[in-house]
Image: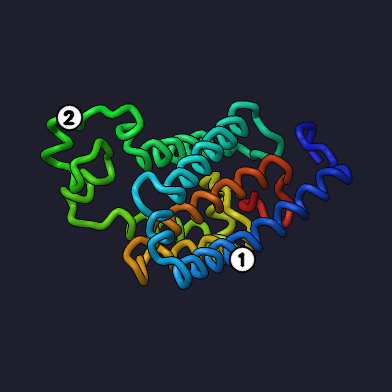
Amino acid sequence: MTATERPRDRRDEQRLVWLRRTAVGSFPVVVAIMAGVLWFDRPTYLRLLREDGVAEWLTFAFLLAAAAGAANIALRQHRGLAGRDWFFLGFAAVCLLGALEEISWGQRIFGFASPEFFLEHSSQGETNVHNVAQRWTGLKTKHVTGIVLFLYGAALPLAVRFKRIDLLIHKLRIAVPPGWLVPGFAIAALMMFDKPTRAEEEIGEMLFSLALLFFVALISYERPTARSPSRA
């Protein structure tokens, strides 16, 4: 044990157990609830997933909380970081960018009009970067986001079971989500296919942001083990 690490006390262990159980159960429960709403009240379901709807604001809140947590981890030189402070600063920046993009940088909140550049180049005429990128590249940003987060949160935790990949990830100072978050990332990725109403990407984004928040919460309580250096 290094000087920056401390043994877990009983409260730490209880928090970890609660965190894991909550994370494992949250994703199927959310999907089941939304499926029930769709079955019994389709208009309400679509209202929940519309622009400025509940799902969008939850995504914003989860990403903002994940950004704050990741920044706190990096700036306070959290125990067990093993040189990953820059990774978590980048993690925080990406989450913050995602949160602001989700609400179009507050455009609808403050009621400001899109600058001419965004009116011309954004696929929806909104003030955000991802719609501009979508217009310029022809790629659906939801597909790119879904693939990237699936690879990071669902595929990578399985890949680091192989020693060479684990050592490479450790060398690159990349923190890998735990295996118990793999189902959550996988479920979120499935939602990005936008079936059956073409609004399900909002559920996918919300679940991805929730998974990232759970990951940040985990780092706050758990230090890495000697057996697997790349895993947080």
Mark-to-mark CA distance, 2 and 1: 48 Å
Q: Find disc 2 in the rendering and name its residue.
A: 115
Q: Residue at x 17, y 49 (%)?
A: 135
* 128 vs 13: above or below: above
Where is residue 131? Give x, y as percent.
24, 46
- Look at label 2 and name its amino acid: Pro
Task: Work out whether residue 125 or residue 83 is closer to the camera in this orientation and state it.
Answer: 125
- Look at label 1 and name its amino acid: Arg
Q: Residue at x 82, y 49 (%)?
A: 13
Where is residue 194? Give x, y as percent.
35, 65
Q: Find disc 1 in the rendering and name its residue.
A: 161
Which type of secondary structure does the marked residue at label 2 adopt? Answer: loop
Where on the picture, by quarter, is residue 49?
Answer: bottom left
* Mark toward the start of the polypeptide (2 vs 1): 2
Q: Residues within 10 Å of mark 1 (few under 14, many from 20)?
A: few
Q: Residue at x 45, y 68 (%)?
A: 38
Where is residue 10? Give x, y as percent.
88, 46
